Image (cartoon, rainbow, N blue to C red):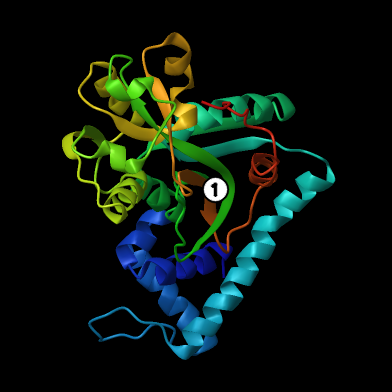
Amino acid sequence: MQIETFRVFCDLVETASFSRAASLNSITQSAVSQQIRSLEQHFQVSLIERGKKNFSVTQEGRAFLQASKEILDTFENLGHRIRELQNVVAGELKIAAVYSIGLHELPPFLKKFRALYPDVTVKVDYRRSAQVYTEVLEGDADLGLVAFPAKRTGLVVEDFWRDKLVLICHPGHPLAERKRVRLKDLQGEKFISFEPDLPTRKVIDRMLREQGVEIQHTMEFDNIETVKRAVEIENGVSIVPQTSVADEARNGSLVPVEVESFDMWRPLGVIYRRHRAISPAQKQFVTLLKEPGWLEDPGAI
């Protein structure tokens, strides 16, 4: 019996899909079925309920799942433990990050990480929030970086930073003359928004709704760079993370204004798969990411 068989079984249970388990392991659906039957015949138990509309696992299957995870963890950790004993942090690290984190919070950290661990090849892909969760769950990314991190089955979620949310407007906008504003001051304003499914948009909508503020959604975009460009050409105002407008604030193309509210903070989180061995590179990345002070304070407005 090969170790890959245990991995196939775990992937089948976690995805509840023969086709997805086949894809994750680069084999056919028929091969998945054959490997599951081989396990059942070897241990003389039924692991998967057959003949039912919905995918389900037997009581013996649930026990076998836990044992399989322990076997895989032991096997996959062998190489990591040997490298740790040799103080070797190397290999490839695949990261999926939402645009704002990948373009603004992440670069100074990556510079520090690469200087400390030059033998690690870091690949960063920029994704929408839902795609980050999916890629980490499906094993296409080792780590994910998201805003307003949410708990998901099969994932470990750890907070590592809080970014302040600020109002941004064109220098010629009346609100640009203010040091701070209230959410109520945005009543009737033309607003450049993130698309409705993005976590930051949902939080901003909730805050405005709780304050009874009605705005005019004039444009919606899926990334922060396009939002900023739309505000620069005087199409409206927006609320964005403070670190994302540091360059524009310095060159005067946008004016960030503090919003008087106790909850104008955007938590950032790192996610990775539960029940999967963590490589030395992943471990050091997460450890360094959570160290205080790695991200420069953008300063007061």
Q: Label 1, on which residue?
A: 270
Relative height, residue 71 to residue 277 (above, below): below
- State the residue in front, 89 or 266: 266
The spot of residue 238 in percent (x, y) is 30, 32
* Residue at the image position 37 percent from the left and 40 percent from the top: 182
The spot of residue 160 in percent (x, y) is 60, 46
Task: Tell me if 245 is positioned left or right of 194 in this view.
Answer: right
Task: Tell me if 65 is positioned left or right of 35 in this view.
Answer: right
Residue 232 visible, this angle: yes
Pick out the residue farthest to the top.
251
State which quadrant residue 217 falls in: top left
* Residue at the image position 56 percent from the left and 26 percent from the top: 298
The spot of residue 284 in percent (x, y) is 70, 42
Element under disc 1: strand
The spot of residue 272 in percent (x, y) is 54, 53
Dot 1 amino acid type: Val
